[in-house]
């Protein structure tokens, strides 16, 4: 049984560019959450998707957007990248109120 | 305010000793708490959770204690092993709020 899978694992972008990160949830999970983890910090909640809708959003600007597909997979899009967007982006899946299972993350470096 | 903080950023123990990692939270409305372990280059891994109607919960080699009076959470690891070396985060959730709020983390180093 595959766990939460994320792609790409590492990527480098320049300021002003756009990035799309992808997540496939654990089998049987219908809810996907995205977190940003800066170096040396705990993960910060970006948003959660359930039934293809954004259910809750953290304190992140509109440059951060997402999508959930009918197969429950999800994408995180970040526009107009800033140096401060450099971080590990974590996807977590769960049943709607169940335990979160995290993926290994996508390491984004913005130059 | 909204915060989940940790008392110590680093903890170094000898193999075989017991480890205690502490966490303070500030909002009395928090009703669900989780401890995660994060190894270098990996995502957080669930260790154990506890709800606010409990004071203690035990797992395999781990125990979580919750003191609601002083808003304090601790993770005890028995017979700490080198494989336990990682960053440990506490996280909390409140009521119908989906998001988890994480603390900054404690780096546990186990010396052989």
Image (tube, coloured by chain):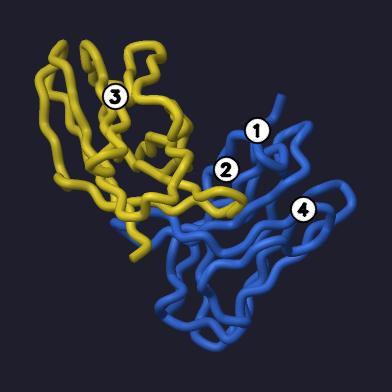
Q: Which residue is mark 2?
A: A103
Structural distance between the alpha carbons of marks 3 and 4: 34 Å
Q: Chain of mark 3?
A: B
Q: Nearer the viewer, residue B112 or A13?
A: B112
From the top left corner, tell me how far across and down residue B2 is, in percent.
Answer: 37, 62
Mark 1 or mark 4: which comes first in sequence? 1
Q: Which residue is mark 1?
A: A3
From the top left corner, tell me how far across and down residue B16 is, in percent.
Answer: 16, 11
Helix, strand or loop at disc 2? loop
Q: Are marks 1 and 2 in contact (CB under 8 Å)?
A: yes
Q: Chain of mark 2?
A: A
Q: Relative to residue B64, is residue A78 depicted above or below?
A: below
Q: Are marks 2 and 4 in contact (CB under 8 Å)?
A: no
From the top left corner, tell me how far across and down residue B92 is, in percent.
Answer: 43, 46
In this rendering, the label closer to the viewer, 2 or 4: 4
Structural distance between the alpha carbons of marks 2 and 3: 19 Å
Q: Residues within 10 Å of mark 3 (few under 14, many from 20)?
A: some
Q: Residue at x 53, y 57 (%)?
A: A35
Q: Can you tell which mark lies on residue B84?
A: 3
Q: Colour of chain B?
A: yellow
Helix, strand or loop at disc 1? loop
Q: Residues within 10 Å of mark 4 (few under 14, many from 20)?
A: many
Structural distance between the alpha carbons of marks 1 and 4: 18 Å
Helix, strand or loop at disc 3? helix
Q: Are marks 2 and 3 on the same chain?
A: no
Q: Relative to residue B105, is residue A79 depicted above or below?
A: below
Q: Colour of chain A?
A: blue
Q: Chain of mark 4?
A: A
């Amino acid at each position: 049984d595959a766990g939460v899978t994320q792609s790409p694992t590492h990527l480098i972008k320049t300021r002003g560019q756009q990035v799309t990160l992808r997540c496939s949830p654990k089998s049987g999970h219908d809810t996907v959450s995205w977190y940003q983890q800066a170096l040396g910090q705990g993960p910060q909640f970006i948003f959660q998707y359930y039934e293809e809708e954004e259910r809750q959003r953290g304190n992140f600007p509109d440059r951060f957007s997402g999508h959930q597909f009918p197969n429950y997979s999800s994408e995180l899009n970040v526009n107009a990248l800033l140096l401060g967007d450099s971080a590990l982006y974590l996807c977590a899946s769960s049943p709607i109120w169940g335990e979160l299972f995290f993926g290994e993350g996508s390491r984004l470096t913005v130059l | 305010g909204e915060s989940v903080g940790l008392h110590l950023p680093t903890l170094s123990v000898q193999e075989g000793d017991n480890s205690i990692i502490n966490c303070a939270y500030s909002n009395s409305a928090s009703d669900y708490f989780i401890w995660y372990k994060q190894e270098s280059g990996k995502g957080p891994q669930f260790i154990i959770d506890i709800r606010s109607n409990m004071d203690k919960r035990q797992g395999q080699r781990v125990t979580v204690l919750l003191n609601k009076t002083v808003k304090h959470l601790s993770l005890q690891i028995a017979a700490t092993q080198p494989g336990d070396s990682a960053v440990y985060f506490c996280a909390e959730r409140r009521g119908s709020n989906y998001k988890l709020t994480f603390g900054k983390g404690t780096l546990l180093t186990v010396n052989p």
